[in-house]
Image (cartoon, rainbow, N blue to C red):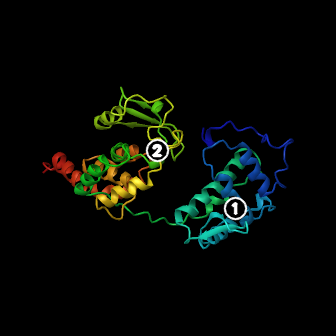
Amino acid sequence: MSENSKTEPSVVRSFPVAPNRKTLTFREVCDAYMAAYDGRDIGRAATLAVWLPLLGADTLAAEICSDDIADALEVLAQTPVRKYMGTHPDGSPHLKQFGLPAPATVNRKKAVLSAVLTWAVRRRLMPRGYTNPCREVESHKVKNARTRFLTNAERDRLLRVCRISSWDRLYLLILLALTTGARKSELLTLRYRQLDLERSTAHLFATKNDRERVLPLPANVIDEIRRFGRPPSPDALLFPSRYRPGQPFNIGTSWTAALRTARIENFRFHDLRHCCASLLAQSGASLIQIADVLGHQSTEMAKRYSHLTLTHKAELVNRVLGDIR
């Protein structure tokens, strides 16, 4: 259930009595939000832990303004990413530093803060007339223009190599990715109970956008799934680990080997979504249809494929309107 669809009582259950809206600190609002949160974002608490020192844990929540948020976002944008890599021999944490965060990463952190403040307004935790200051702060420009997709020759080579992979389900995985446009995480967590082979569909319960989605499965995918026979149980993963069947298969080694053997460079698994979208675009699908297949909430992300639909648009215009004199 999404945050917007929850029942919203006038007083948050985590407060024993009605709170004083003017004296609630940012930390108290964040704690109340997380106590009520039942979404699927497992990193949300960690994101709020980043915001607490930036805005001040003991700052009055109602006094956080757009300037504070804009300044904090600039700090985030200029702070190199550090990841936990284990511990040193002395027991201290080993943190490896990477480059600066991508604009999309900074925007996601802003979106989490905005969700908290919007939630606080709806739960009557903020003073009357308070508006979410995140709305006054521009998001960082995202340049995700990468649209790498396979040529026909590359696609044929990759599929041939996947058929003879040491992991017998690599071909099925790549075929699914190419024909459904689903994300790697959505496919690797797919269970047999989500498949309806008679209706040729797969039901995704937990997607990136927190929405359910139904994937149409073409006949070649259905045939390949059936080739593996009946699963041990309906809850079995379609792509289980060899040694831990309850966990998805780690595709790293098999995928890298397939790309190397197929002589394909500068290509990520996620680019298979671009391949699916580009094939749809070149076959005359509209941006709305492409967005629907990929599970985008709007056509904005699908606009990167608009140039591929130009030929089909021209054909349509000439066929329908070309005889007007």
Total numbered labels placed on residues in the image = 2
Q: Residues within 10 Å of mark 2 (few under 14, many from 20)?
A: some
Give the vertical position of 195 relative to 31 (above or below). above
Give the vertical position of 260 relative to 186 (above or below). below
- What element does badge 2 sit on? helix
| Residue 46 visible from this viewpoint | yes
Which residue extends farthest bottom? 78
Q: CA distance from mark 2 to mark 1?
A: 32 Å
Horizontal arrangement in the rendering, residue 104 relative to residue 179 (left or right): right
Residue at the spot x=48%, y=64% of the render? Answer: 142
| Residue 128 visible from this viewpoint | no
* Residues tagged 2 and 1 counted as in contact (Cβ below 8 A): no
Q: Which residue is mark 1?
A: 51
- What element does badge 1 sit on? helix
Question: Which amino acid type corresponds to the residue marked 1 in the rendered image?
Answer: Trp
Of marks 2 and 1, which one's residue comes earlier in the chain?
Answer: 1
User: As rendered, which of 298 and 162 lies closer to the eye?
Assistant: 162
Q: Quadrant of residue 144?
A: bottom left
Residue 260 location (% of width, % of height): 33, 61
Q: Which mark is residue 188?
A: 2
Residue at the spot x=15%, y=49% of the render? Answer: 324
Horizontal arrangement in the rendering, residue 43 relative to residue 254 (left or right): right
Horizontal arrangement in the rendering, residue 97 relative to residue 184 (left or right): right
Of tags 2 and 1, which is closer to the observer?
A: 2
User: As rendered, which of 260 and 2 lies closer to the eye?
Assistant: 260
